[in-house]
Amino acid sequence: MADDKIELRSEKVRRIIDEKPSWIVRYGITVITVVTLGLLAGAYLYFLS
């Protein structure tokens, strides 16, 4: 009983997790993050004055 290992993730889930996202997904996440941070910084500076 103690030697039985419980599989927390199926083979399909492990395959998805191990797969590196394509360049367009990584680039898109970066662009969205930069735009969001820029808008937040702009709103902060606008309402600060």
Image (tube, rainbow, N blue to C red):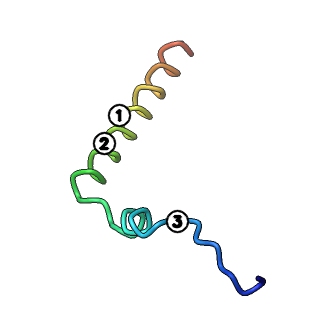
Q: Position of residue 7 (x, y in %)?
A: 58, 71
Above or below, 19 relative to 4: above
Closer-to-camera residue (41/15): 15
Query: Residue sitting at 38 percent across and 64 percent down?
Result: 12
Instruction: Tell me the mark number nearer the camera, choosing from 3 and 1.
Output: 3
Above or below, 46 relative to 2: above
Q: Using residue 40 as the reference point, say whether residue 1 is left or right of it.
A: right
CB atoms of marks 2 and 3 within 8 Å = no
Tag 2 residue? 31
Tag 1 residue? 35
Closer-to-camera residue (10/42): 10
Above or below, 49 relative to 9: above
Tag 3 residue? 9
Q: Position of residue 45 (x, y in %)?
A: 50, 21
Query: Residue sitting at 52 percent across and 65 percent down?
Result: 9
Closer-to-camera residue (24/8): 8
CB atoms of marks 1 and 2 within 8 Å = yes
Q: Classify 10 Å Cα crowding around label 1: few (below 14), some (14-19), many (20 and above).
A: few
Amino acid at the residue labelled 2: Val
